Amino acid sequence: VKTLRKLEECYYTDSKMIGLSTGFKNLDKLTLGFQKSDLIVIAGRPSIGKTSLALNMAEHMIMNLNQSVLIITMEMSSEQIVERMIGSLSHVNLHEAKQYGFTGESWARLSHTVQIMAKKYFYIHDEGPLDILEIKSTARKIMREDKSLSAIIIDYMQLASAKGFEHNRTQELAHISRALKSLARELDIPIIALSQLNRSVESRLDKRPLLSDIRESGAIEQDADVVLFIYRDEIYQKTELNKGTAEIIIAKQRNGPTGSANLRFVSHLTKFENEDDLFEEYWHNENPNI
């Protein structure tokens, strides 16, 4: 019945998006958005942009779709998360601004973004590495308080733990991934979990990740409905042609095609964008007095 209703909605609204939009057009075309009850894994090597990509998706869901999102961060503080979101949304390099000072325009952008964010609903849980039972308890608590919760982001899986598996990391990660998939089904919302990759990817000529590169557990690959890899060629060989280019590889999609979506990476903002995004035009259309 649920499947029929979803297909009916797609038919009657002529919509090509049956899930939660990520804000990235090329990715949404391939996934049709993130589906309810799905476990989506975003994986990549350190400093490739996993947190940035997940936060950019959250920004779109919160700011443009008016959805509420829970971010469980085990690596960064809530202040760091909010600061990155504000800088990304306002297109202000906060590191540079704090070092050299704000311009009038950058401060106006920042202030406007904060005012809008203050009216939105999102939650950040930043109590450090958590047991999987604590993650589930936190998610259930937020869902009880806010029935409109639409997605959960977990940064990142390898920092979580599970009691009873202290001496077998592979089994521990397998238990965690199964628990996250079960939680996604229980709450009927997509869970976006970040994951590290093994170093083996660095030893290959082609540095694009493979499913076998997911760190410490093949169970993550099995439990995930969607696996996304981030690949940025400029990290391995910098040229003018690949500067700012990013490839989101859909290595697994249980109910859809695999493939790649090309994005742009703005390094000074640690922000992923659609290739054809024109922020300046958007900003002045929304804020004609600035």
Image (cartoon, rainbow, N blue to C red):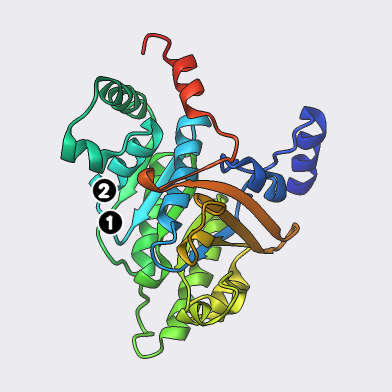
Q: Nearer the viewer, residue 113 or 94?
A: 94
Q: Position of residue 182 (x, y in %)?
A: 54, 64
Horizontal placement of 268 versus 35: left or right? Answer: left
Horizontal placement of 33 versus 143: left or right? Answer: right
Q: Which residue is mark 2?
A: 80
Q: Residue 51's quadrant in the figure?
A: bottom left
Vertical placement of residue 43 versus 101, above or below: below
Q: Residue furthest bottom?
A: 167
Q: Nearer the viewer, residue 217 or 215?
A: 215
Q: Are marks 2 and 1 in contact (CB under 8 Å)?
A: yes
Q: Residue 11's quadrant in the figure?
A: top right
Q: Position of residue 7 (x, y in %)?
A: 79, 41
For the question of whether residue 41 can be seen, the reply is no
Q: Which residue is mark 1?
A: 76
Q: CA distance from mark 2 to mark 1?
A: 6 Å
Residue at 57% x, 40% y: name it.
Answer: 274
